[in-house]
Image (spheres, helix red, strand yellow):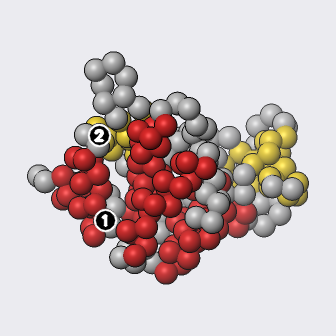
Amino acid sequence: MKKDDILAQYMPAPAAPIIAKWIDYFQCEFKISKSRATKLGDYRHPFKDAGHKISVNNNLNSYAFLVTTVHEFAHLLTWNDHKNKVKPHGQEWKSNFKRMMSPFLEQQIFPEDIQQAIQTYLKNPSASSCTDLGLSRSLKKYDANHQYQRLEELPLHARFVIKDGRSFKKGERLRKRYRCTCLNNGNIYLFNPLAEVEVVPEGTYMAS
């Protein structure tokens, strides 16, 4: 199967030929990885006999997959230009990210809401698209798995379960995070508003 055809299974089809050309041009090893809880993608610079390596999680929706792929290629380009002499997400990376995202915006590959969120994000890209609430919310709308909801969508005092099985009660928002009580041990934890949780329906018994 051609590289374009494989990539088109994970990202919008019109974007696949561009990414395939980048993979060939930069002689990059591109890996589609299993889901990782701590990151959406990863870039490794050349070391000894190994060349550039990029990996992107396979469970992302097609638009999130493309945004993450561009993010990692911007790291690659920044390393080619500056090696380890600049910050990972400094001005050089921001400039390259904007540049590499341009062809996809020009072709209007993204839906209008994501397109607008990306343009807002590009005014000052942060280390990860997940840390930008507007862009992250837009991308999340296109997830196929609706089992989980974002914590910010739940009402105050709602009970929920996270992916490791622990149960919590949602509390007040403190600046950027929600103060939630773990029902398994009584400890307090601070949650990102975009944390994906499974809602426990009213009336369901939960040991507290």
Q: Please name the residue that numbered disc 1 is placed on.
A: 15
Closest to the observer: 16 or 107?
Answer: 107
Residue 110, compared with residue 16, is above or below; it is below
In front of the other: label 2 or label 1? 2
Residue 58, compared with residue 44, is above or below; it is below
**Residue pictured at 30% horizontal, 25% vertical:** 50
Q: Please name the residue that numbered disc 2 is placed on.
A: 28
Q: Quadrant of residue 109?
A: bottom left
Q: Mark 1: few, some, or many residues within 10 Å (few <14, many ≥20)? A: some
- The quadrant the C terminus occupies is top right
Residue 179 showing in the rendered view: yes
Residue 139: x and y, percent?
Answer: 52, 66
Tell me: 12 left or right of 101.
left
Closest to the observer: 29 or 196?
Answer: 29
The dot on residue 125 is: none
Residue 103: x and y, percent?
Answer: 37, 68
Tell me: 120 left or right of 187.
left
Tell me: 36 left or right of 49.
right
The number of discs equals 2
